[in-house]
């Protein structure tokens, strides 16, 4: 914030809005109609649920798992992120008993024979391929695909498509997402592929209304929007300060004080990088009243007694005495678990987080603070799309704890307020197939499938369904996919990974087991003895 800010105030129009802040009346939980419809659907068929974050999709999953468990069956809950997987493992352990829940990620494998498995989507794909190779049935009765919009992810979407193509039809699939625009198209493909109905259940209403705010550099909080346009004072500011918007570095501690003054905490600050999250803590200073929250200190001490090595964590003082924390993929898993637990219990004032938190880790806040309208996509920064934006906004407003949630936009060099306004009213984006042939896919399919079966699969892929207006065109698209697949196959033959009968050689079999994005690179290095032995 600018150094000229000597006072903090709110626009008079916000007084009525802020008067709505508070906890809704308590009462017994009553499922919403869409939740009951989805539960009824998954008992008999596949089901795709599209509902805002916090609307109660997890309740549907838990009830479906419970019903399968009651019948002696097994369930697989697949998520795209290790952070979300770890959170669900703890959550389901509390819900169903720890001995009934196992976890499978690239880092962790515990209780793998449990009736409920929580794991990353890639691990589910690997288990599916292994079962196909051995001619065995995948020993599950229900598969839940969380964050199903990853089907359209450029890097990983093909994994989702492979799973949906090859899962046995006897296993019902429950797909969950907050941000899919073409649910009927996906359901149509699944129905045609699997020969059974896929019911689409949609809920568009947020459980907690969202109100967008703007933090003016002069120290005033005002509405970001007037009806569907930017607030006049925001427009005036943009006219005076053309982008790139030059402002001093944000004083995070001061912003937290302002939010606290107007009862807008707890808050999640979404920042660009892990380094920014850690650096933000430095501007947060403890106050007398902050560190004297007895129930917080009791719960914190109990956790530290179980994991005493965390007492030396360099950020513990900020957690304990300022009740703020940094949360990102570079933190120790148990530290992140501690932060998540303290946030869920309502002990923390704010956390500074990367976008990982938006993608499903379950600890909503009253307010989301946004400094940037772009996001790192793995290779570069690009403008937020509606899926990414609505995932972040889904964290604002806690069902059962808040009557209203808030977005606070803070101006800066990387904040395009006009783009933010568009995103606020944008509909969820359509999902497009990302199916493509790569060596990992070819190797894994050849473990259990003959080429003629694979050709049939490509013809019935979501890619062929989506871009083929009719059956004839779908077959033509499937043929193009097959031609690309054959080129990969020819290379594998030439390099000795596949024999003349299109079966994997010994080298091909162990290359397929690498489960890497570029298995041939590693396989060739191993064959050529290119790695140092010490």
Image (spheres, grey):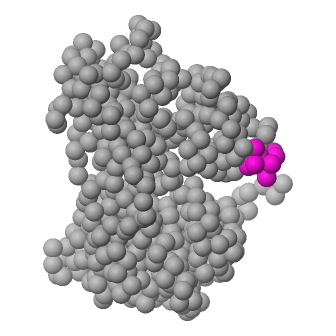
Q: In front: 167, or 388?
A: 388
Left or right: where 162 falls relative to 341: left
Total numbered labels placed on residues in the image: 0
- Residue 297 placement (x, y as % from top left): 70, 39
Q: In front: 489, or 338?
A: 338
Q: Quadrant of residue 313?
A: top right
> Does residue 307 show up magenta in the picture?
yes
- Residue 119 placement (x, y as % from top left): 57, 68
Q: Is residue 11 shown to the viewer in this render?
A: yes
Q: In front: 84, or 21?
A: 21
| Residue at left offset 56%, top offset 49% | 344
Q: In which quarter of the image is the N terminus?
A: top left
Q: Is residue 332 shown to the viewer in this render?
A: no
Q: In front: 130, or 345?
A: 345
Q: In which quarter of the image is residue 195?
A: bottom left
Main SS of the magenta part reads helix
| Residue at left offset 55%, top offset 44% | 346
- Residue 415 placement (x, y as % from top left): 35, 29
> Does residue 211 show up magenta in the picture?
no
- Residue 271 placement (x, y as % from top left): 48, 34
Q: In which quarter of the image is the C terminus?
A: bottom right
| Residue at left offset 75%, top offset 48% | 302
**Vertical order, 436 against 413 (above or below):** below
Q: Which contiguous range is marked in magenta? A: 300-309
């Amino acid at each position: 914030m600018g150094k000229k800010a000597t006072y903090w105030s709110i626009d008079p129009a916000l007084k009525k809005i802020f008067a709505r802040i508070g906890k809704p009346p308590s009462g017994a939980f009553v499922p919403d109609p869409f939740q009951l419809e989805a539960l009824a659907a998954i008992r008999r068929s596949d089901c795709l649920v599209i509902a805002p974050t916090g609307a109660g999709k997890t309740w549907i999953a838990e009830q479906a798992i419970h019903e399968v468990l009651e019948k002696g069956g097994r369930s697989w809950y697949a998520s795209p992120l290790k952070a979300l997987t770890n959170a669900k493992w703890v959550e389901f352990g509390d819900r169903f008993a720890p001995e009934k829940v196992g976890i499978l990620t690239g880092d962790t494998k515990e209780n793998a024979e449990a009736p409920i498995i929580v794991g990353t989507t890639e691990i589910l794909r690997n288990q599916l391929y292994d079962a196909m190779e051995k001619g065995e049935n995948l020993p599950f009765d229900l598969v839940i695909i969380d964050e199903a919009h990853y089907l359209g992810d450029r890097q990983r979407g093909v994994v989702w498509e492979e799973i949906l193509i090859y899962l046995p039809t006897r296993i019902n699939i429950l797909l969950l997402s907050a941000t899919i625009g073409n649910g009927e198209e996906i359901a149509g493909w699944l129905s045609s592929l699997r020969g059974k109905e896929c019911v689409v259940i949609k809920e568009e209403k947020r459980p907690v209304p969202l109100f967008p705010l703007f933090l003016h550099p002069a120290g005033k909080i005002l509405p970001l929007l007037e009806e569907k346009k930017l607030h006049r004072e925001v427009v005036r500011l943009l006219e005076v300060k053309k982008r790139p918007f030059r402002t001093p570095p944000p004083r995070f501690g001061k912003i937290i004080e302002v939010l606290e003054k107007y009862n807008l905490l707890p808050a999640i600050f979404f920042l660009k990088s892990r380094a920014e999250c850690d650096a933000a803590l430095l501007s947060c200073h403890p106050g007398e009243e902050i560190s004297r929250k007895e129930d917080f200190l009791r719960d914190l001490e109990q956790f530290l007694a179980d994991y005493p090595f965390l007492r030396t964590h360099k950020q513990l003082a900020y957690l304990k005495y300022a009740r703020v924390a940094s949360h990102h993929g570079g933190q120790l898993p148990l530290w992140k678990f501690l932060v998540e637990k303290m946030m869920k219990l309502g002990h923390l004032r704010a956390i500074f987080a990367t976008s990982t938190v938006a993608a499903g880790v379950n600890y909503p806040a009253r307010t989301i603070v946004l400094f940037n309208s772009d996001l790192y996509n793995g290779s570069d920064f690009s403008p937020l799309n509606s899926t990414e934006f609505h995932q972040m906004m889904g964290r604002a407003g806690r069902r059962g704890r808040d009557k209203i949630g808030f977005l606070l936009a803070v101006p800066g060099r990387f904040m395009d307020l006009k783009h933010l306004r568009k995103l606020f009213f944008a509909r969820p984006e359509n999902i497009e197939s990302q199916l493509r042939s790569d060596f990992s896919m070819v190797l894994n399919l050849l473990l259990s499938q003959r080429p003629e079966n694979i050709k049939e699969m490509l013809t019935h892929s979501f890619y062929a369904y989506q871009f083929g207006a009719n059956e004839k065109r779908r077959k033509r698209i499937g043929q193009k996919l097959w031609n690309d697949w054959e080129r990969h196959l020819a290379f594998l033959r030439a390099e000795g990974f596949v024999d003349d009968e299109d079966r994997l050689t010994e080298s091909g079999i162990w290359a397929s087991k690498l489960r890497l994005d570029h298995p041939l690179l590693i396989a060739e290095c191993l064959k050529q003895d290119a790695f140092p032995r010490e």
